[in-house]
Image (cartoon, rainbow, N blue to C red):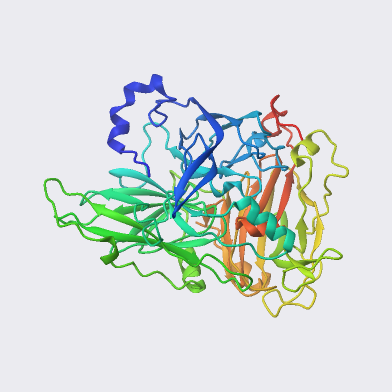
Amino acid sequence: MSFLPSSFLGALLFLTCFGNLYPGVALASVTRHYKFNIRLKNVTRMCGTKTIITVNGKFPGPRVFAREGDRVVIKVVNLVSNNITIHWHGIRQLQSGWADGPAYITQCPIQTGQSYVYNYTITGQRGTLWYHAHISWIRATLYGPIIILPKQNQSYPFVKPYKEVTTIFGEWWKADTEAVINQALQTGAGPNNSDSYTINGFPGPSKNCSSNETYRLKVKPRKTYLLRLINAALNDELFFKIANHTFTVVDTDASYVKPFDTDTIYIAPGQTNMVLLKTKNISFNAKFLMAARPYSTAASGTFDNTTVIGLLEYHVVNITSANSSITALPVPPLPPINATAYVANWTNQLRSLANSRFPINVPQTIQRRFLFTVGLGTNPCPKNQTCQGPTNTTKFAASVNNVSFQMPTIALLQAHYYRRWKGVYTTDFPNNPLIPFNYTGTTPNNTQVTNGTKLVVLPFNTTVELVLQGTSTLGAENHPFHLHGYNFYVVGQGSGNFNSTTDSPKFNLIDPDERNTVGVPSGGWVAIRFRADNPGVWFMHCHIEIHISWGLRMAWLVMDGMLPSQKLPPPPADLPKC
């Protein structure tokens, strides 16, 4: 839970010499230094104490504050036995691909006792992003917000909020998440579930022993609050609601949108939203429950089917009211767990602001078109082993265009830069499905995937249109896909199989939503466009952690341009070695 009063920002302008201590108040673009000590911390939740991996002993992790245009320098020191990398989710990383963070894609992991300095400039972005570990399932506890304020003397394109509040959705696992994923990969089965969802690290009052572990948001009547929402959960998309209140959505993934009102937020893993909450005109200390629970259409395996509760508390000066029990308050009704139509209607409301102050630049002429199928599949069970996948002779897998991505042992960006790519990756990732089929129809008889480390090569400044087509193989699911190093425009989405003849003419090329993470609809497709103007190797993957572990991932290799500003710089001297 974090507050950033807008009045406080203005009052502290004279403290610009302390920019690193008060990173929200600098008068001009500055360099902001942070130090992240990755260390263990004992945290008690739900009747038990567990040792977790944290940043500086905080769960969730500390905030990174900056303004648009600032340079951010973060020294990460690994004080735990696990290998570590950190990804700055949504940061464009223009000419700073070495700082993106995914293990074995842009860097080798930071080993125990070692450190690495992530150095990047925030260019053309303002809003809410976040950081998280990007190796195995360590991001279960290692995550935190990135708050990007507008440039000094620039305002939000909406009403000035009374306060700003960061709210992060996550999960609490009694088990060791590294053991959970290792067991799942060994047996080929779906993973065990988390024990609770969390709001800012708290599981709420509905769990045994957690009556004092409830997130509380204290507000005043007749005020406008800006909520910065982040879904850091490993494996679940979420609905979020506050009883008897509505939100105005103003931003997605640090890009402004045309405001629209809703009483329920839909947010997938990896995504962020900024919403305005206008409090009621009441004269007593009222309490309202807030709730979040999953959206899922998964036919394979189980999921955490619980609801996390938080509390919105009105505070009226000099007025007291009888203390009321939280358990007596009504839980706000949320859409059904499998409410695919609701999700489609919700996301279809998103439109970029697209005005003279915040213009967009949707590629109108396309040079490369791709159709990627995304979904589940199988790998054969190893010889002399019984597995627990869809059958006892198979393991669960996942793929893009039937290629299940195998992680290399050398970072792809290093292999590319030093031209040592032979034996590390190939550049023959298929542009389209090699064997077309009825993608959203009956599961085909052959569900086996291929395995490899294949990349798509793009010349600098190529305009790209990508259709991500969901499949119903082993069950249709919504797949939130994240593209590193880029924002993209969501120009269309629909149900069933994509038809270029009938669907392409309906694309929105005027004011499409701009994001870095988009849901591929369950039993449907989504179309995005972007310009490949950032040289480097850029990961693209489903942000449901078990799916990325199963191979639902690939990478783009964007080549250098002709100008110095269009080339990938040399790697920093402290880049970790494999």
Q: Is residue 260 left or right of residue 221?
A: right
Instruction: Give the x, y percent position of residue 25.
Output: 38, 29
- Foreground of the two, 313 or 520: 313
Is residue 417 visible in the rendered image? The answer is: yes
Relative to the observer, which residue lies in front, 31 or 578?
A: 578
Report which quarter residue 573 is drawn in.
top right
**Is 394 above or below relative to 23?**
below
The residue sitting at 78% across, 50% down in the picture is 455
From this viewpoint, which residue is outermost toward the top? 17
Say which residue appears at 33% left-offset and 25% top-offset.
13
Can you tell which quarter of the image residue 384 is in?
bottom right
Q: On the picture, is 295 further left or further right than 167? A: right
Residue 404's x, y, as percent? 76, 59
Q: Which of 367 and 63 is in front in this view?
A: 63
Q: Quadrant location of the N terminus?
A: top left
> Which x, y percent locates residue 379?
79, 65
Point 78% across, 60% down: residue: 403
- Is 148 drawn above or below residue 259 in the view shown? above
323, 31: nearer the viewer: 323
Vertical relation: 159 (above or below) 448: above
Q: Residue furthest left?
A: 318
Q: In which quarter of the image is the C terminus?
A: top right
Residue 329 shown left or right of residue 295 in the figure? left
User: How many marks overall?
Assistant: 0
Q: Residue furthest bottom?
A: 442
The answer to whether residue 363 shows anywhere in this view is: no
Residue at x 67%, y 69% (from the top left corner): 500
Q: Position of residue 510 (x, y in %)?
A: 52, 57
